[in-house]
Image: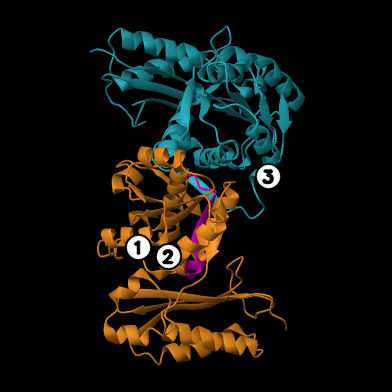
Chain colours: A cyan, B orange
Amino acid sequence: MEVHGRVEDLRAALGSRPRPVVFVPTMGALHEGHLSLVRVGRNWAGGAGTVVASIFVNPSQFAPHEDFDAYPRPLERDLEMCREAGVDLVFTPPRDVMYAPDASVRVLEERLSQGLCGRSRPHFFGGVCTVVAKLFHIVQPDAAVFGEKDFQQLAVIRRMVRDLLWPIEIIPGPIVREVDGLAMSSRNQYLDAESRRQATVLHQALGLARAAIQGGERSSVALKELMETHVRTAPLARIDYIELVDPDALTPLEMISSQVLVAMAVFFGSTRLIDNLCLRDLTA
Amino acid sequence: MEVHGRVEDLRAALGSRPRPVVFVPTMGALHEGHLSLVRVGRNWAGGAGTVVASIFVNPSQFAPHEDFDAYPRPLERDLEMCREAGVDLVFTPPRDVMYAPDASVRVLEERLSQGLCGRSRPHFFGGVCTVVAKLFHIVQPDAAVFGEKDFQQLAVIRRMVRDLLWPIEIIPGPIVREVDGLAMSSRNQYLDAESRRQATVLHQALGLARAAIQGGERSSVALKELMETHVRTAPLARIDYIELVDPDALTPLEMISSQVLVAMAVFFGSTRLIDNLCLRDLTA
């Protein structure tokens, strides 16, 4: 496995590697969820090809009050995990490679990024689109893998690629969970023991919603109430949002018809956790 | 010469053409200025390679009150001129190829695009960056040629390519002028005979500024006054702006030191003409 921090070095290394090139962008602090994205990418390439991962904690997707400085950066451990997962090339750019001091160009998605996490984090998706655009131009992949845990991010990236006519296939990676159901996240390590115990309410609330929808419930108000009531059984939980939206347009649904994304964000202290459930092909 | 309107067809045609690929994006209504960009591109490729031109009147760079509908679209004549100039491939996308009805992604440059033409046309550079980003993803050129008549556009595109880490070289093409000095523009054809006669004041005012600067004048106020006085000798002229800025940062200069961009926009009726003069390596 090669590790490069300079654009020219990565491009030179890529020049002698087989296509297709599959790209897995990360902010590091890797866990089993990231490794599953690497495997999804490897499978997509059919065993051949080249898998590139990037590790870069992107400043432009953090608001000033958020956890950019505190975000974990266990680089040696991350590289070891990449090696074990079969990554071929890792790109670890320093900040000034990605952002010149007088950088003045942003890529903005202005519809799908408005609701859900975009409401609580208004700078987030602009920062994500901008850094992913840069990384795509550096790596020039044939495909890139994004996890479904960040469902809205996946939708926004797909839209960016579609609207900017990028010849890159976006591959979704399923949510990977701890044994008790908590969706894996680099931010789970911020949780103290009691918050960690209570954090299972997100997954449980989604399970209740799934069961109710499969039992015929179609009212968003009723489903939200069901979920909120459950989340409130965790005294340390503070709901940021629970929403039922169309999984393509990400617009709120009053009544579910054939498909729904149930998405939620819940704070435990200053740690914000997200989770979601996407159901398609529902029958009345 | 091949002409394609669909992305897949252009990509397929490009797949069997030699690199480097040099790209000349246009809005059609071609004139000698555009053809000179084709020649600049051909020279850059060293006689080999592939020259791609696009013809697309980009709606997102026009404000509602501007001349999008009236903009000339002499497609057959444009294609004939491309053929004679030695273009290999022409891309003529219909609007819905470039903009889906629910398109929601924009590329914005937020510093160099603020002054000069960006002040009078606040949507212009966002529209230009967005459409050029799309075209770059479609054509995937090694280099692209932009005319120096649109000096600010050239600077903004360079910045976009730098900040988004695009492996594309941006090549400037010198201003091409009519025999009386008027900078060639597709919009010159909007001018009636009397406005066309008076439109030479732009070039003449730049000539006066050049002579004064070469004679030692360094004060922007004095130089602007000199130019404004000359432009006002044309009764049909209405000055939009005359500015002296640093040619890299595009920030206003009070006193010229080693380099200056003298840029101007002047209306004749509803037709807005631009011109500029860039001087570098000046000595005190």
Which residue is drawn at the image coordinates 63% and 14% (left, top)? Answer: A194
Q: Which residue is mark 1?
A: B81
Label annotation for residue B118:
none
Q: Which residues are magenta?
A: B140-151
Label annotation for residue B35:
2
Cα separation, mark 3 vs mark 2, equals 36 Å
* Tag 2 subunit: B
Kind of residue sitting beneath label 3: Val
Q: Is residue A137 above or below residue B154?
A: above
How crowded is the residue under tag 2: few (<14 C-alpha within 10 Å), some, or many (20+)? Answer: some
In terms of secondary structure, where does tag 1 sit? helix
Q: Is residue A58 above or below residue B250?
A: above
**A247 with respect to B154 (left or right):** left
Front one among A271 and B4: B4
Q: Nearer the viewer, mark 1 or mark 3?
A: 1
Look at the numbered discs 1 and 2 and tell me whether their residues touch, using CB distance below 8 Å: yes
Q: Are marks 1 and 2 on the same chain?
A: yes
**B59 with respect to A86 (left or right):** left
How crowded is the residue under tag 1: few (<14 C-alpha within 10 Å), some, or many (20+)? Answer: some
Query: In the displayed image of the protein, which residue is found farthest to the right?
Result: A76
Cα separation, mark 1 vs mark 3, equals 42 Å
* Tag 3 subunit: A
Residue B263 in sight:
no
Residue B35 in sight:
yes
**Quarter holding residue A36:** top right
Residue A234: image x %, image y %?
A: 53, 15
Q: Which residue is mark 3?
A: A97
